[in-house]
Amino acid sequence: MSALLDRLVSSLTMALVAWTQFRMGPQNNAVVPGELHAAWRVETSGQISASPTVADGTLYVGNNNGLLYALDVSNGAVLWQTKVPNPLMSAPLVYNDLVIVGEGDPTSRTSSPSEPVSVGQGPSALIGFDRATGELRWQTMLKGSAMPTPAIINGILVHHDGAGFITALNPATGRLRYSHSIGSMASMTAMLPIGDADFITAGVGSNAVWRFHAADGALIWRSAFSKGASGIGDCPQVSDGTRVFCDYVSPVLPDTSTVIGNLTVERVYALDVATGSSVWDIALEGGSLPIRNEAAIPMIADGLLYLGSSIAPWMHAIDAATGMLVWEMPTRGVVKGGIVDVDGVIYFGDLGGYLWAMDAKTGRVIGDKLMHTPFNVGSPIVVGKTLIIGSDSGAVIAMPLDTIRASHDT
């Protein structure tokens, strides 16, 4: 009876959730209220690079083998699954009776991460599926990979693809509204809605961050970064309403561009959301540049910017106003994925296979649980009292928050 009540309360609460952008809101703090307290594990037979989405008691997540799953969030039971030819790395959006995903692979036809020709080979598309059945409702092909997560703003679906095109569609039908090239390729970034009319995105090739008007694609501002910078197109920005934040990697002399395997430095920036002007840009630690997923996914809560690192095993908290480092804490592996904050505790996974709970203000380790599967950019969400995350080995895992807090496996 208790489990049934928990599911009923969670379903009623989640029915009110509008999931129309990456990780639900501009802070990237994907927390859905409710009473769910569950432990389960589902193997999907494909690496997971997507952040899951929950609506009306159903969890949606894609994997890199092109499989999209709908799972019962209370117990992990598979409600339906469907398959497309290429990976599904974008976070699913929920729009009325549709679940919308981006199809596309991470292949780049160049040896320089900061100067790709384009990203994506094979089919690249935005696709709308029926939420109840998984039936294909519409499909709109793109010129480059649809790995970046789109957003829906005032009934307009906006996307930045791996060929450098900004595209807008009708989310109900997939019908094209406009498409134009900005000469800069997006990879694993996400469209960040600003207010109820604009969005921010970022890309490499022409390394920059842009703000556009969603209705017509008009440019509001462009903020340029150095030619050698990389990972800008991998980072989904966050905003506190006055600033926009993200991270990237820069080369170390004598290198003038980033090279996979070479030493690089992680940098974190803040831009003025109204003008695009730089507020601060700081350097963190150095480390070897990975072949993919060069940026960490940030989260902002209570004036602090939290993010891990794609090149070194650390978690950081940075003062959002000043760029000053408040605390940093070593982890068992690099932390590329997202972070959630619940009641002053942050939770996340690392590439070493651990789930962590840390005090948000001090970085003190509260709990760490070894899961024996690495966590890459398949980012966690919290539903009620349960963390749900996708792993690099293809598992979707639900773990109660109190279990993580009580674990001490290091």
Image (cartoon, helix red, strand yellow):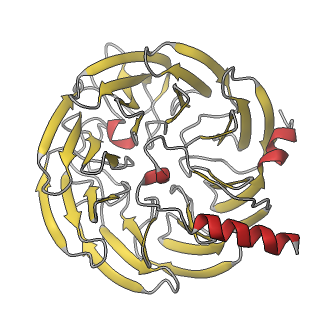
> 187 or 178, which lies in front?
178
Residue shown at the point (26%, 55%) measured from the top left: 161
In this rendering, the answer to whether 114 lies above or below 319 is below
Residue drawn at x 11%, y 48% is 218
Q: Which of the pair 352/295 is nearer the observer?
A: 295
On-image quarter of the N terminus = bottom right
Give how far across and how far down residue 8 sits, in percent. Answer: 72, 73
Q: Is residue 125 left or right of residue 38?
A: left
- Occupied quadrant, residue 71: bottom right
* Residue in the image at 51% along x and 25% along y: 303
Where residue 241 appears, as percent x and y from the top left, is: 37, 34
How far from the left and from the top, in percent, is residue 219? 12, 43
All told, the count of numbered labels is 0
Would residue 75 be visible to someone looking at this image? no
Give above or below for 399 relative to 254: below
Q: Is residue 407 visible?
A: yes
Quadrant the C terminus occupies: top right
Q: Nearer the viewer, residue 22 or 337?
A: 22
| Residue 73 as seen in the image, left or right of residue 194 | right
State the image quarter where residue 95 is shown.
bottom left
Residue in the foreground of this view, choosing between 186 and 255: 186
In the image, residue 160 above or below residue 178: above
Q: Position of residue 93 (x, y in %)?
A: 43, 64
The residue positioned 59% from the left and 34% from the top of the image is 334
